[in-house]
Image (cartoon, rainbow, N blue to C red):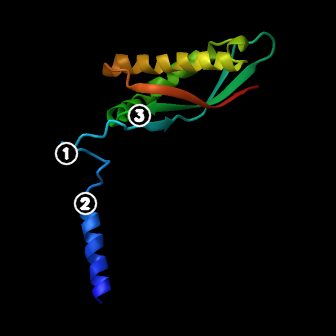
């Protein structure tokens, strides 16, 4: 009986306490906040001589604050639009090599940051990753 009472008491204390890593004394989020937002897969045709070619990729965006997370989600439709337009304007040579894909990732990051800068007044996004990249 005493063990059960002690267990209930300990669980009650744990439920009432706030995790130390979640917020500091003023209620602000810790400085080392990092979160990732996975966008739905992109499918776009790109410029290629001859037959029609397609690109399918998945993009993940890294944010470093809850405000950034909210801003990306709020403007996700415009971000997707800009990325699809950018991908569709590329030529095969801009997509084939790993080096070209790294350049493309940096260009995509700038597009996302420009959307957020225009809409929110702050770039918010820390990085952008291709988590899948297929050319067909």
15 horizontally vs 52: left or right: left
In the foreground, 9 or 110: 9
Q: Label 1 neighbourhood size at 10 Å, few (<14), some (14-19), many (20+)? A: few
- Tell me which residue sits at (46%, 28%) in the image: 77
Q: Secondary structure at mark 2?
A: loop
Q: Are marks 2 and 1 in contact (CB under 8 Å)?
A: no
The tag on residue 73 is 3
Q: Label 2 neighbourhood size at 10 Å, few (<14), some (14-19), many (20+)? A: few
CA distance separating discs 3 and 1: 28 Å
Query: Residue reaching furthest bottom?
Result: 1
- Asked if residue 100 is positioned above or below residue 31 in the image, the reply reads above
Q: Residue 86 appears at what percent x and percent y?
A: 57, 16
Q: Residue 68 appears at what percent x and percent y?
A: 36, 31
Of the 4 image quadrants, the one containing the C terminus is: top right
Of the 4 image quadrants, the one containing the N terminus is: bottom left
In the foreground, 96 or 25: 25
The tag on residue 17 is 2
In the foreground, 46 or 111: 111
Quadrant position of residue 47: top right
The tag on residue 25 is 1
CA distance separating discs 3 and 2: 30 Å
- Tell me which residue sits at (25%, 67%) in the image: 13
Of badges 3 and 1, the one in the foreground is 1
């Amino acid at each position: 009986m005493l063990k059960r009472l002690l267990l209930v008491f300990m669980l009650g204390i744990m439920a009432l306490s706030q995790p130390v890593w979640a917020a500091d004394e003023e209620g602000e989020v810790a400085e080392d906040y990092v979160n990732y937002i996975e966008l739905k897969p992109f499918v776009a045709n790109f410029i290629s001589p001859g037959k029609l070619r397609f690109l399918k990729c998945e993009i993940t965006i890294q944010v470093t604050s809850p405000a950034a997370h909210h801003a990306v989600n709020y403007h996700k439709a415009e971000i997707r639009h800009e990325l699809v337009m950018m991908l569709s304007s590329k030529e095969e040579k801009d997509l084939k090599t790993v080096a070209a894909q790294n350049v493309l990732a940096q260009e995509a990051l700038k597009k996302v940051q420009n959307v957020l800068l225009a809409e929110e007044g702050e770039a918010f996004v820390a990085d952008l990753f291709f988590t899948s990249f297929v050319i067909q």
